[in-house]
Amino acid sequence: TGTTRPQRLLRAVQERATRGDSESVIAAIDHFCRHQEWAMNVGDEKGFILDSVVSEVSPQTALELGTYCGYSTVRIARLLPPGGHLITLEFNPNYAAVARQVIAWAGLEDMVQVVEGASGDWIPHLREHFGIESFDFVFLDHWKELYLPDIKLLEECGLLRKGTVLLADNVVCPGTPDYLEYVRKSQSYESHYFGSHLEYTRAEDGLEKSVYLG
Ligand SMILES: Cc1cc(-c2n[nH]c(CCNC(=O)c3cc(-c4ccc(F)cc4)cc(O)c3O)n2)ccn1
Ligand SMILES: [Mg+2]
């Protein structure tokens, strides 16, 4: 038995970061992943692009698919405007448990709701359960084969509005070919690719930003 990688990542945060200081939480996770153990956080290089898109959108309502340990959750939540709220869906209960503690260590628990379960099961219930009309911003970072079915579901549930910004991680590595083809060809989206690298490595990866046109 022993500890899991997410538990070791959490311990690194609790040992190295200052409670309530989200920048120190981000730095502690990046240090752990660069010098101790690689983990599938969006990372500092792609994280900088994520920050710029979130700052530009300044969302009142944001959705993240795939919480993992809460690294990108903290990056997004720390940039939300007053009254802004982030819902993040996580399938794995062990990841969710660690993420809740990372988010709390950063002092951002009041802006974030971690929801456990499969994205396909939860998306149809977000409106009634959380009183959400539509999302201003969606970050896709969960199972790569779910990106396409899940944005189609978001469209069908009326959770996207004219101008909703979608930002997708890992469109090159591991890759989301069907999603990329769809958002780049569809008349309902205006897409742009931000080239970068797989977190903490030199491998190519990038983020795809797609604005929903309705
Ligand atoms: C609600 C809901 C949530 C989920 C869900 N929650 N959390 C996840 C994790 C998903 N993320 C990844 O798999 C991922 C993988 C790599 C990677 C791995 C190994 C390599 F060699 C190279 C790259 C890099 C990344 O940046 C990734 O994000 N899925 C699933 C279903 N429903
Ligand atoms: Mg990712």
Image (tube, rainbow, N blue to C red):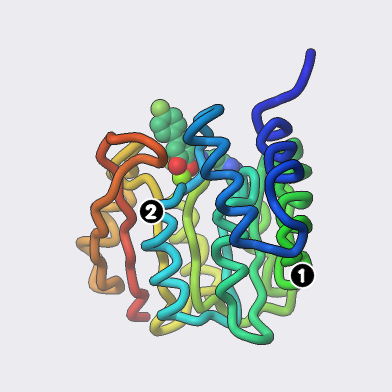
Q: Which callout, 1 or 2, points at the residue further toward the start of the chain?
A: 2
From the image, which quarter does the N terminus lie in?
top right
* Few, some or many residues within 10 Å of mark 1 (<14, 14–19, 20+): few
Name the spot of residue 95 as percent of width and height, x first: 69, 40
* Residue identifier under label 2: 46
Q: Amino acid at mark 1?
A: His
Residue 145 shows in this picture: no
Name the spot of residue 20 as percent of width and height, x first: 75, 64
Residue at screen point 55% across, 76% down = 135
Distance from Cα at disc 1 to Cα at disc 2: 31 Å
Residue at screen point 61% across, 44% down = 68
- Check disc 2 and report its element: helix, strand or loop: helix
Name the quadrant containing residue 86.
bottom right
Residue 206 shows in this picture: yes
In this view of the protein, which residue sits in the foreground, 202 or 129? 202
Residue at screen point 61% across, 50% down = 67
Residue at screen point 71% across, 66% down = 112
In this view of the protein, which residue sits in the foreground, 209 or 180? 209
Q: Relative to 31, is 105 above or below?
A: below
Q: Amino acid at mark 2?
A: Lys
Q: Furthest-left residue in view?
A: 185
Disc 2 under 8 Å from ligand 2? The reply is: yes
Name the spot of residue 142 as percent of width and height, x first: 52, 46
Name the spot of residue 103 as percent of width and height, x first: 72, 57
> Which label number is shown at residue 43?
none
Q: Relative to 75, is 121 above or below?
A: above
Q: Furthest-top residue in view?
A: 1
* Residue identifier under label 1: 129
